[in-house]
Image: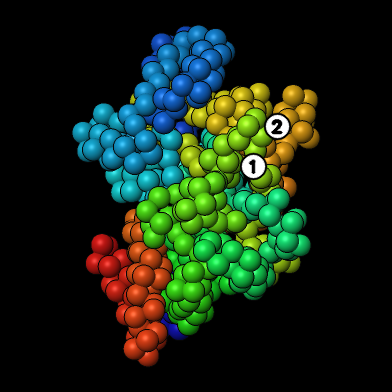
Amino acid sequence: MKRIFSLLLVLTMVFSLSALVACGKTAPGWQLGDATFDPNAEVTITFYSTMGTTTLAPVADAAIERFMEMYPNITVIHEQPGDYDTVRDTIKTELTVGAHPNLAYCYPDHVAMYNRSGKVITLDQFIDHAEYGLTDAQKADFIEGFYNEGKQFGDGFMYTLPFSKSTEVLYYNKTFFAEHGLKVPTTWDEMEEVCRQIKAIDPNCIPLGYDSEANWFITMTEQYKSGYTSATGNHYLFDNETNRAFVERFARWHSEGLMTTQELNGGYTSSLFVNQDPTLPKSYMSIGSSAGATHQRPDKVDGAYPFEVGITSIPQVDAKNPKVISQGPSLVLLDTGDTQENIAAWLLMRFLTTDVELQAEFANASGYVPVLKSVTEISTFKEKLDNANGGDNIAYLSMKVCLEQEKYYYTSPAFNGSSTARDQVGALMKYCMENYTTHKNAGTIDKLIDEAFKNAINECESQL
């Protein structure tokens, strides 16, 4: 009898597990279910963005007007609370009182924070919807690395869609490189060699400027596959031998005057790259945002640029398996408790992310990379890419490089605490660079690096 009972218990557990696997996990939060959109009901939705600049505002206004012509019963209130952090902090506060927007600009760590309220709407139910969803062609049109950012939350569900993106690229003084027969580096080993060659030519220079310490650290962990963070289980994986080794290497570069960063420089390193004052230090390479290309171009002197800017992908650990970071805003839906509003907000999200003409217009106005491949098929946009150069058309040269490396993009896991990890790895990079020489002279480099990593891990865990 006991054996029969045990067998029945095992069979019950097996069938229960099979049912769970067959059904899959249940998406968190609000569910569309069988609800439909009423085209006769007046609906008002609110959209938060950072498009308040003189160049982007007209594009945004025209796009929203076009959307409301498509859906006359939907009124869109478009607000710009401030920069990305201000949008995040405003929504964080408003979620506590139920006064939040329906749709908003976001970064992954923002969404992880909002998710604690249970108000983030997962998008799979919309994406695959027979009437409101995306077509197979629309799904395939997204640049894969940008699209997959929406799935980096540890449960397999889609939380965001990409709106506009940027990455990091290597700007270099093409004129100087040609004059001295220098090879543009494709790996970090080559970068060190080139920096030493440049330093020998111009001893007073700082050959390389890298704007973001955090991006540098995170990108190296991706290139080495050495571990950074995880959305589930043990979140913080970055304290390991491989990561300590590259931090020590770059700290040594800094101590030898081969490179600097934005924090160490006291401002964007593009200031060194474009500098034409012989009494001030200058650089011949700069790694920074692809969207900031115009800031990497020197001012004209007597009607001409003093040097030509070249743009290429950042160096790699393995040039055959490149990885570059995906940045820039995505869009997130937030549940207001009103089904018609939720559907209307999705329709606006779908329009903003899949309308090819809008994506081209926004790229033209902002310098950000369009998230749709088919934008390059628009004749006017293609013509600008074809005529891209390191002078007047430098923004398009930057976008061209970004589009050519569409298969290289990565995104980091997003969870409550992922932004803390980013801050801490950036801070430890800076700390090790600042203190390397002192500890080198004292013979305590290993101690410096080990303590910096342990302190960063402790800070991350204490925030949880």
Image coords of residue 21 (percent x, y): 54, 60
Residue 306's tag is 1
Image coords of residue 225 (percent x, y): 57, 71
| Front-lying residue, 79 or 219 | 219
Residue occupying image coordinates x 65% and y 52%? 173
Q: Secondary structure at mark 1?
A: loop
Residue occupying image coordinates x 41% and y 25%? 52
Residue occupying image coordinates x 64% and y 53%? 172
Estimate how packed mark 2 is, as few (under 14), some (14 to 19) or many (20 or more) residues with alpha carbons within 10 Å: many
Residue 65's tag is none
Residue occupying image coordinates x 27% and y 62%? 464
Image coords of residue 145 (percent x, y): 62, 50
Q: CA distance from mark 1 to mark 2?
A: 33 Å
Image coords of residue 384 (percent x, y): 73, 30
Q: Amino acid at mark 1?
A: Pro
Estimate how packed mark 1 is, as few (under 14), some (14 to 19) or many (20 or more) residues with alpha carbons within 10 Å: some
Which quarter of the picture shows residue 339?
top left
Which quarter of the picture shows residue 22?
bottom right
Where's the N terminus, which quadrant?
bottom left
Please tell me whether mark 1 or mark 2 is closer to you in this view: 1
Residue that carries the numbered disc 2 in the rendered image: 375
| Front-lying residue, 150 or 3 | 150
Is residue 391 positioned above or below 426 on the image? above
Q: Secondary structure at mark 2?
A: helix
Q: Amino acid at mark 2?
A: Val
